[in-house]
Image (spheres, rainbow, N blue to C red):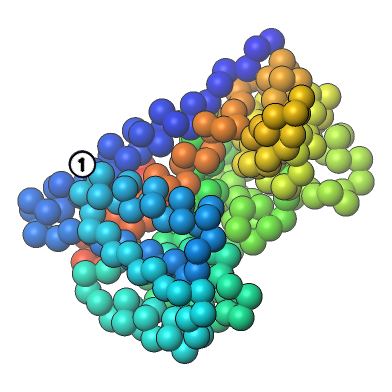
Amino acid sequence: MTAKVIDGKAFAAKVRGQVAEHVARLKEANGIQPGLAVVLVGEDPASQVYVRNKHASTIEVGMASFEHRLDASTSEAELLALIDKLNADPKVHGILVQLPLPGHLNSELVINRIDPAKDVDGFHISNVGLLGTGQKSMVPCTPLGCLMMLRDHHGKLAGLNAVVVGRSNIVGKPMAQLLLGDSCTVTIAHSRTKDLAEVCRRADILVAAVGRPEMITGEMVRPGATVIDVGINRIERDGKAKLVGDVHYESAAAVAGAITPVPGGVGPMTIACLLANTLTACCRANGLAEPEGLTA
């Protein structure tokens, strides 16, 4: 068996196209332009790349982009004051503070200062609680992207056995909640799970989000299962740097029914879902119908 490759890059382009269509209709029918504010503190090279990509994608779909680049020495009080200003700005529908923050800043305090309705990362404790109790919330972008791809591949997910390997607040836990919301039978596993391979082999849907290069091998995958690889790990192989996932791609692809590659799988969906969340936040703020197919 050779697995179908789930092309996250192509799917993300489709999502961005849907967002752009909704944004154009909002402008024409309601005179409203969704706006995303991104705050970057310091000069972390990877964060600078992410922010640059987010800005370009925001402009591409017709949204307003508000960039705030702050010095690494910015005080907590100054950062919180900026967030308060963005919370009060009606042109800003989504706020994202790029992580990681410099060590002297309290990330939890900063994230929880964002208005939950504008928390397009879905990290505010209120949104975490709403998601956990099955209520309407802002959903973290990466799990949302995984859910969209699974729905597209399977149609209905109800009744499928899902195993999520990883228990982080950013991916593992919200991913499990989203799959529960679609009536999957969900197991959360992790590096300390007894007989992890056997647990994984029960899965119709196997989501790897544990942060360990190629930890999930083909012998841990049930034949025909759908494998979603959230991991992005930089390793050296044959003297060259290479990006690999949490799944050993070659062995898993030989067994699975469908699989996401790394790179080009889940990664591109994260920014696409950030834009979708910003659109959703804008619609909710203005009492308009939420975009179909772009929410959990």
Q: Which residue is mark 1?
A: 21
Location of residue 270 in the rendering, given as x and y in whole percent from the top left corner: 47, 47
Name the residue at the right extreme.
194
| Quarter of the figure with the N terminus | top right
Residue 139 located left or right of residue 199: left
Residue 177 located left or right of residue 20: right
Instruction: Establish if 142 lies above or below 39.
Output: above
**For numbered disc 1, what is the local secondary structure?**
helix
Location of residue 115 in the rendering, given as x and y in whole percent from the top left corner: 40, 76
Residue 102 located left or right of residue 251: left
Residue at image position (47%, 39%) is 268
Instruction: Establish if 75 lies above or below 186.
Output: below
Judging depth in this view, the residue of 34 and 55 nearest the camera is 55
Q: Quadrant of residue 38?
A: bottom left
Q: Amino acid at mark 1?
A: Glu
**Is any part of residue 211 visible from this angle?**
yes
Residue at image position (87%, 34%) is 198
